[in-house]
Amino acid sequence: MVKKSILIVEDEQIPAIDLKDTLISLGYRVTGIAPSGERAIDMADEETPDLILMDIRLSGKLSGIEAAEQILLHHAVPIIYLTAYADPELVERAKRTRPYGYIIKPYDERGLRTEIEIAFYKFTLDQNQQREYTQLEQRVLERTNDIARINAALQKSETRYRLLFERSGEGIFIFEAEGEERGKIVEVNAAGASMHGYLPKELLTMKITDLDVPENLKDAPARFKEILSGKWIGGVINHMQKDGSVFPVDFHAGLLELDGHNYVFSVMQDFSEQKKAEDALKESEGKYRAILENMQDLFYRTDMQGKITMLSPVGARLAGYDSTDDMIGMDAASMYAEPEKRNQLLSAITENGEVSNYPITLKVRDGSLRYVTTSSHFYRDTHGTVLGVEGIIHDMTGLRQATDALQVANKKLSLLSSITRHDIRNQLMALKTYIQLSEDSMENPAQLAEFLKKQELIADTIEREINLTSDYEDMGIKSPVWQNVEEIVNKALSGHSLQEIMVETTCHDLEIFADPLLEKVFNNLIDNALRYGGQKMTAIRISSQESEKGMIISVADDGVGISAEDKKHLFTRGFGKHTGLGLFLSREILSITGITITENGDPGKGARFELLVPKGEYRLIG
């Protein structure tokens, strides 16, 4: 099949080359690129193309419109104008050359192809109709000059005409152009009748407007007026079939003069198939949108300046915004924890064509960090020009937090093991010493009893160490999880006898990311208050308040409080009346996910332990 040839008239080299590549990829043959109107005229004379894509504003003395006027004096070729300006005056000047299309830059590949194909189609119709019109005009002239010859020629010509008329796959209608009978159908072929569900003889009793849907009737007078002015009109309108169903037709109509009488000659094509294709495309786009809106990973697109132009809904949630509308137009670099990393990402894409699972640290709206990976590449227009970057972002924050926390927990476990071994080893050395002393004191019952008492105390201490190790053997074994503070506090309270002590909790709907041993932390804090609060203590209050640094969770009582001297050693291993590990290990458990603990109460007025949870490690679920 011979490729259609196209001449490009464009004075900008890069857009012209891009356009040439696009046309070739669409299956057309490009006869050349003319950088000026003068050169376009010469190239059209050397090889007349099947179509010309003409930029209106050109360097040189001639504009695209003036060049088109001169080319059309010598060649019958369809012209489509290309321009970056939609100036009404410019459009009116261009219309005088009867162009077959008018495309505003920038354009996409699909729109360009559609415009070109429609131009070829219209041009073919015009040529056929012009030839038909010429034949009809010739017959009238012949009949005027020589009646006998005209009658014979007419009979032969009408046979050919009827054959063409009846066998045409497109609907052909001839109807009255004016007067009381305006619109009355005087000729219709089988294809035209069939597409409307009628027999030809039925349509000959009707007007063309009887086929219009009601909403089109108001425009009918204007269409007749345009045709009577000598214009060929066309477009897609809805017609009704005999059974009342509606379907689209692509029509072209113009004035036909026979024997001094005005008729309208119209060619129609059933547009249903193309309409179905357009509907299918819309459905496909709808499905694509549904996938985009429901995907768990984030889809994004930025222009080459780094401005966000498209974002899936999960992106707004990840960044802490109410909707994607709040983020369109934002500078993507502003979301990087290290803005220079965006340039590194672009360099990696440029070097490799794309990146996969590329690590990035993002800073979201509340200042917290999100650890993500991206698979990204440059996206291009139909001409291959890079327009920006697009890709998928996968949030790895939870995994990163869990991994970091497990690493910290392993260190804590190692520390706990070391502490326990050290303490038990010391106790065993003391025990062996007292056993040896006991053996040497067999003859002294009083001294022997004293040594045995000390051995019993040492054994109790070792037992407490082992029990404590058992309590905390799960520290760091399981990954940190999101935990409801109020539920954890209630579980911790259930293991204590509160008697008349009132406990008030106001941490509603608060969750924090912490080691599963969080319950033991609150158990230790509550136990500490009950043991050392004194007889004056009447209440324990657990509350939360958000600050610039994060969420502060307070565990406060109204007991005797903690002395300034004891505050210095409160979280030190071994400090206290029992093992001395309760508060020390509580601090270690909390630090696995970056939570700190301090005691800020006033001596004599009660103890107040404050847990500071960093941003990103807490959330409100209400």
Image (cartoon, grey):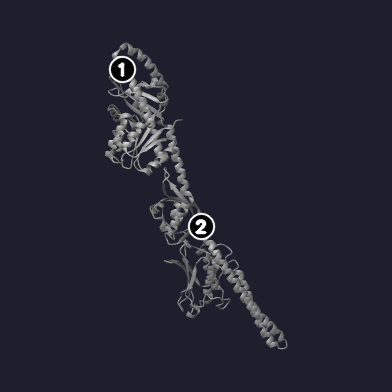
Residue 78 can be seen, yes or no: no
> Which class describes the residues within 10 Å of circle 1: few (<14), some (14-19), or many (20+)?
some
- The amino acid marked with disc number 1 is Val
Residue 433 % position (x, y): 67, 82
Q: Quadrant of residue 205?
A: top left
Q: Is residue 443 above or below residue 372?
A: below
Q: Is residue 462 visible?
A: yes
In front of the other: 491 or 298: 298
| Residue at the farthest top position | 148
Looking at the image, the residue that sits furthest to the right is: 443
User: Which residue is disc 1 drawn over?
Assistant: 140
Q: Are marks 1 and 2 in contact (CB under 8 Å)?
A: no
Residue at x-position 52% and y-position 62%: 401
Q: Earlier in the sequence, mark 1 or mark 2?
A: 1
Q: Residue at x 28, y 35 (%)?
A: 66
Q: Relative to 607, is 437 above or below?
A: below
In the image, 528 versus 206, the foreground residue is: 206
Amino acid type for the residue under numbered disc 2: Met
Q: Judging from the image, what secondary structure is the residue with disc 1 in?
A: helix
- Vertical placement of residue 530 versus 368, above or below: below
Mark 2 residue element = loop
What residue is disc 2 on?
396
Q: CA distance from mark 1 to mark 2?
A: 83 Å
In-front residue for pair 80/52: 52
Counting from the top left corner in percent of width and height, residue 221 is at: 29, 29
Circle count: 2
The percent position of residue 541, horizontal first and vertical second, equals 47, 70
| Mark 1 or mark 2, whichever is nearer to me | 1
Mark 2: few/some/many CA within 10 Å (<14, 14-19, 20+): some
In the picture provided, is 97 more to the left or to the right than 31? left
